[in-house]
Image (cartoon, grey):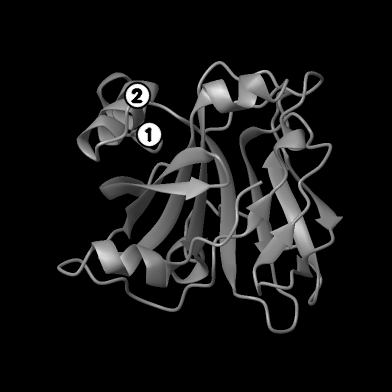
Amino acid sequence: MIGGWSAANLGLFYRNQPLEGAFTPVAAVEASAWNRSQVASGLLVHPRLVLTVAHAVLFRAGAQLFAAAQVKVELGNVRAWADAVVIPSRFLEQAGFVATQDLAVLRMPMEVSGPLDPPLLADSARDGEAMLWGWTLVRPRTQVSIPVTVTTAEDGNLRYPAVNLPAFSGGPLLRSTGPGQPDELLGLHRAFHADTQQGEAIPFSSEDVLEAMHALGFDV
């Protein structure tokens, strides 16, 4: 489970790269979404969307270390900062889940993703609902959505229970439009290295995480 890592925390590390816009703490996502019966390509691919990792740091969640990153999201002349967390694949494997690559969690403000053409999300959600979005694997691919329950934990973090995720292509994505909830997207991604994936996804690899840990003095 991920939680408690906010844009304010990230800002402490990036004094020369201030976060723009209003961001809530990174939501908690249940790792059980990636169980042995699920397969997901995990790539958020859009012809007009550019994602760039600006910085990365390490933080501790319990006894485990994760990499957190500031991600620059660009659409034409529109730019914004998003938060990302990278979970090394070995952590997922130790928990009993199938994970051939690192998993990344990205939060994106709707001000950037809203005007995408073709649309990133279909316009079928009802007000006050949190929806899980994705594209079907079967061609012709169509976009589908299912309602999910978003709760607020005692620490104030939003918790999206992403359990029993369908096998989506190009996602999945979560959008919450409930009262008091931010108008933003939460995307689950496989974290590929930019050298091999040409920047189509968050450019992280296990080697990157390991190198960052060593650079910060952790004996891994």
**Type of amino acid under label 2:** Gln
What kind of element bears circle 1?
Answer: loop
Give left or right: position of 115 versus 55: right
| Residue found at the far left of this picture | 16
Asked if residue 198 shows in the view, the reply is: no
Q: Residue 118, image x and y in percent? A: 52, 51
Q: Which residue is mark 2?
A: 197
What kind of element bears circle 2?
Answer: helix
Q: Residue 26, image x and y in percent? A: 55, 60
Instruction: Pick whichever, 2 or 162, lies toward us.
Output: 2
Residue that appears at 47% across and 58% down? 116
Q: Which residue is mark 1?
A: 200
- Proximity of marks 2 and 1: CB atoms separated by less than 8 Å: yes
Quarter the C terminus occupies: top left
| Residue found at the far bottom of this picture | 180
* Mark 2, other Cα within 10 Å: few <14 / some 14–19 / many ≥20: few
Residue 45: mark: none
* Quarter occupied by residue 129: bottom right
Give left or right: position of 38 versus 98: right
- State how far apart marks 2 and 1 are (Cα): 6 Å
Give left or right: position of 171 versus 15: right
* Quarter occupied by residue 170: top right
**Type of amino acid under label 1:** Glu
Q: Residue 120, image x and y in percent? A: 56, 52
* Quarter occupied by residue 14: bottom left
Residue that appears at 80% across and 76% down? 128
Q: Residue 20, image x and y in percent? A: 32, 74
Does residue 98 lie above or below 163 as drawn? above
* Mark 1, other Cα within 10 Å: few <14 / some 14–19 / many ≥20: many
